[in-house]
Image (cartoon, helix red, strand yellow):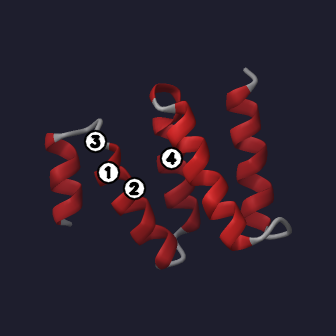
């Protein structure tokens, strides 16, 4: 909860965003994690892409969430 408060006071702080997404990822809240990252993608393309690719590596290429969010990331990257 403190991180959410911190994010409200510094909405573009990627360190806070990554701490929040790491927490979601660790708690298996994968959709929340990846949706949050996609929301930040337009302003921080390389850092967000790198973070998502790291998560994909942990999940594995055949994980349904990896497949779904790789498609979403590709769509955003090439649109």
User: Can you say which quadrant of the picture contains the N terminus?
Assistant: bottom left
- Residue 38 in picture, x, y percent from top left: 55, 41
Q: Which residue is mark 3?
A: 13
**Residue indicated by mark 4:** 37
Query: Camera-side residue: 65 or 57?
Result: 57
Which element type, helix, strand or loop, lies under badge 2? helix
As displayed, is residue 8 above or below residue 3? above
Judged by depth in the image, the label closer to the viewer, 4 or 1, is 1
Please tell me which of labels 4 and 1 falls first in the chain.
1
Q: Secondary structure at mark 4?
A: helix
Question: Where 30 sits versus 8, above or below?
Answer: below
9 left or right of 66? left
Label 3 – label 2 distance at C-alpha? 9 Å
Do the numbered discs 1 and 3 sit on residues whose CB atoms are within 8 Å?
A: yes
Q: Mark 4 or 3 closer to N-term?
A: 3
Disc 3 residue crowd, few under 14, some 14–19, many 20+, Cα 10 Å: few
Q: Identify the secondary structure beneath mark 3.
A: loop
* Quarter holding residue 49: top right
* Marks 4, 3: nearer the viewer: 3
Do residues under tags 1 and 2 come within 8 Å of each other at their CB atoms?
A: yes
Mark number, residue 18: 2
Query: Mark 1 Cα within 10 Å, few/some/many (few <14, many 20+)?
Result: few
Q: From the viewer's perspective, is residue 36 above or below residue 29?
A: above
Q: Which mark is residue 15?
A: 1
Q: Earlier in the sequence, mark 3 or mark 2?
A: 3
Q: Label 2: how many residues lie within 10 Å, few (<14), some (14-19) or many (20+)?
A: some
């Amino acid at each position: 909860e403190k991180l959410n408060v911190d994010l409200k006071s510094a909405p573009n702080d990627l360190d806070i965003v990554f701490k929040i997404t790491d927490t979601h990822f660790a708690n298996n809240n994968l959709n929340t994690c990846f949706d949050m990252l996609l929301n930040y993608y337009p302003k921080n393309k390389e850092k967000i892409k790198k973070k998502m690719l790291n998560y994909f590596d942990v999940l594995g290429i055949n994980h349904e969430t990896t497949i779904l969010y790789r498609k979403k990331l590709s769509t955003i990257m090439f649109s």
